[in-house]
Image (spheres, rainbow, N blue to C red):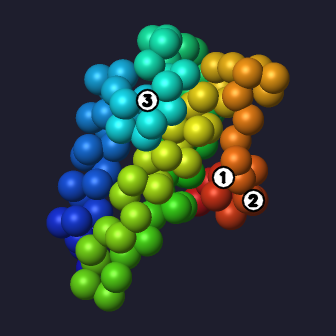
């Protein structure tokens, strides 16, 4: 079985938003529009790994492979990026990440 066209498209757009430094605009997290987060995140590859895990672990699809919650998955991944760049007194993730969200496969 191959990944669905809908998932491949969602992944492509997620990568596009990330590398164009526009996750903040897409997710609505204004803190991400203030920094060049790509440069900062590239200094810690394990953070990139976790960001992709959060995006992938949150994706939901129907029986045909259609992605149902692209915006939510982007928001959760964006929240993680924001936590990598700002102290807890500046940005707090709501709701907190659950173990299954950050699990690497």
Q: Which residue is mark 3?
A: 24
Q: Quadrant of residue 68?
A: bottom left
Q: Quadrant of the C terminus?
A: bottom right
| On screen, residue 1 above or below 45 | below
Does residue 71 appear in this view? yes
Give me the residue at 49% from left, 46% from top. 75
From the viewer's perspective, is the residue at label 3 or at label 2 nearer? 3
The alpha-carbon separation of the residues under discs 1 and 3 comes to 20 Å
Q: Which circle's residue, 1 or 3, is located before the other in the chain?
A: 3
Within 10 Å of disc 2 (Cα), the crowding (few <14, some 14-19, many 20+) is few
The alpha-carbon separation of the residues under discs 2 and 1 comes to 6 Å
Q: Which residue is mark 2?
A: 99
Does residue 42 appear in this view? no
In the picture provided, is 53 more to the left or to the right than 99? left
From the viewer's perspective, is the residue at label 1 or at label 3 nearer? 3
Q: Secondary structure at mark 1?
A: helix
Q: Residue 42 appears at what percent x and percent y? A: 50, 19
Give me the residue at 70% from left, 47% from top. 94
Q: Residue 44 appears at what percent x and percent y? A: 61, 22
In the picture provided, is 10 more to the left or to the right than 61? left
The alpha-carbon separation of the residues under discs 3 and 2 comes to 24 Å
Q: Residue 73 appears at what percent x and percent y? A: 46, 54
Q: Which residue is mark 1?
A: 102
Q: Secondary structure at mark 3?
A: helix
Within 10 Å of disc 1 (Cα), the crowding (few <14, some 14-19, many 20+) is many
Give me the residue at 34% from left, 43% from top. 14
Q: Quadrant of the N terminus?
A: bottom left
Give me the residue at 73% from left, 59% from top. 98
Labelled pair 2, 1 in contact (Cβ < 8 Å): yes
């Amino acid at each position: 079985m191959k990944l669905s066209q809908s998932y491949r498209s969602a992944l492509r757009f997620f990568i596009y938003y990330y590398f164009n430094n526009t996750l903040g605009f897409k997710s609505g997290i204004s803190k991400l529009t203030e920094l060049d987060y790509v440069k900062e995140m590239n200094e810690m590859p394990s953070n990139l790994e976790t960001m992709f895990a959060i995006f992938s672990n949150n994706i939901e699809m129907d029986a045909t492979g259609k992605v149902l919650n692209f915006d939510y998955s982007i928001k959760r991944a964006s929240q993680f990026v924001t936590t990598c760049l700002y102290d807890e007194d500046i940005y707090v993730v709501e709701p907190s990440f659950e173990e299954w969200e950050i699990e690497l496969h």
